[in-house]
Image (cartoon, rainbow, N blue to C red):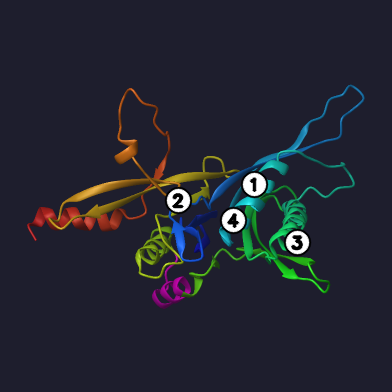
Amino acid sequence: MTLCLAWTQNGRINIASDSRGGHADEYIDTLIKVMDLPVKIETPVDQDGKSEFAYEQTLGFCFSGRTFSSVIIRDHFAEMLKHLQFLPGVTELSLENIVKFIAKLFTRVSREFKEGYDWDPETEFLIAGYCPLLKEVAAYNLKLYTGDAPGEFEPSIDRVLADPEEIFYMGSGQDRAIEKIEEEDLNTSSEILRVLRDICRDDIPDVGGYMQFGLFDKEDPKNFVIRGVIEYEIDENDEFEYVYIYRGLEMHRGDFEVNEQDLQVRMRYFSPFHKEIKDYFDRKASGD
C-alpha cells in the first residue's frame, strides 16, 4: 500500500506520496508518509565537557508497506537520529553511513515484529539528504531481505537518483505510475504530480487520499522541507474552488475554516496544477 515518487528538477530532489494507510480491507487517508527527519551528529565531549555538531541537517524520508510496522519503525528513526555521535578521523561522516545506521535500527525493530507478530518487514524506505562526503544531496533506497537463519534479516542499501533523469518509484502503485509516466514521457514536477493525483483518485484501493510533497528548496538546498499542495475542485455546476492540502488534510475549510480567534497552520504551498487552473479560467472567460 502506497505510491511514492521521487525525482530531480532544477538540480533538487523532490519526494511525493499518497496518504492512504490501512490494514486488511480497512484504510484511512491521513497517514503521514513524506517526512522531514532532523539528524544531529556530535563530536565527542572534550575535557571541558563540551561537544560540537559536525552534522545538523534535515533528511527527506518516505516509506511504503505495512502501515503498523512502518510507523513504529519510522518513530525509532525520528528519535535516534537526533542523538548521534562520531569519532573524527575514524568514523566516515557521510549520508551512506547515516543510512547504514538507519538500517541497523530497521533490522533490530523488524526482528521484534517477527518474534512478536510473526511478521516479515514488508516495508521499504526512501532516504534523501545532504552528504558532506559527496558535497551534494543524495538518495538511498533501504529494504530488508530474509536472512539464512529464521527471524534474521539482511539490509539492502542502494543509491538512487544519482542520474538526474531518473524517476524513483516505490510501493504497490508503482506499476501504474511507471506505465503512465513512461508512456507519456513525463518528467516535470507538475506532470509527475498529476499522475500521482490521478492514481490517488482511481478505484484501486491500495493508493488514495490527497498527495504529500516535499523537496530540497533552492533557499536552503541542504535541508528537506515539507510543502502543502494546492489542488482544486470543479463541482457539477462548473464552479471552481481551491483546495489547500497539508499532510493529507484539507486546510482553510471544514474543521480548519479560517477564524481569526483560532490558531492556524502556517505553511507554504506548492501549486503543481497551475496550467489546468489557467485553462479553466480561460475557458470561463471565453464563455465556453
**What amino acid is found at the position of numbered circle 2 in the picture?**
Thr
- Is label 2 in contact with label 3 (beta carbons under 8 Å)? no
Q: Which is nearer the eye, 21 or 50?
A: 21
Picture coordinates of residue 170, whole percent (x, y)? 55, 66
Mark 2 / mark 1, whichever is N-terminal: 2
Mark 4 / mark 2, whichever is N-terminal: 2
The quarter in which the C terminus is drawn is bottom left
- According to the picture, the residue beneath numbered tag 1 turns out to be 75
| Nearer mark to the viewer, of 4 and 1 | 4
Label 4: few (<14), some or many (≥20) within 10 Å? few
Label 2: few (<14), some or many (≥20) within 10 Å? some
At 83% from the left and 50% from the top, the residue drawn is: 92
Please indicate whether residue 141 sits to the left or right of residue 277 in the image. right
**What amino acid is found at the position of numbered circle 3 in the picture?**
Glu
Picture coordinates of residue 254, whole percent (x, y)? 30, 40
Label 1: few (<14), some or many (≥20) within 10 Å? few
At 30% from the left and 47% from the top, the residue drawn is: 243
**What amino acid is found at the position of numbered circle 4 in the picture?**
Phe
Mark 4 / mark 1, whichever is N-terminal: 4
- According to the picture, the residue beneath numbered tag 4 turns out to be 68
Q: Is residue 115 magenta?
A: no
| Nearer mark to the viewer, of 1 and 3 | 3
**Which region of the structure is painted magenta?**
176-187
Label 3: few (<14), some or many (≥20) within 10 Å? few
Disc assigned to residue 30: 2
Work out how far the residue at label 1 is from the one at label 3, CA to CA, in angstroms: 19 Å
**What amino acid is found at the position of numbered circle 1 in the picture?**
Asp
Residue at disc 3, secondary structure: helix
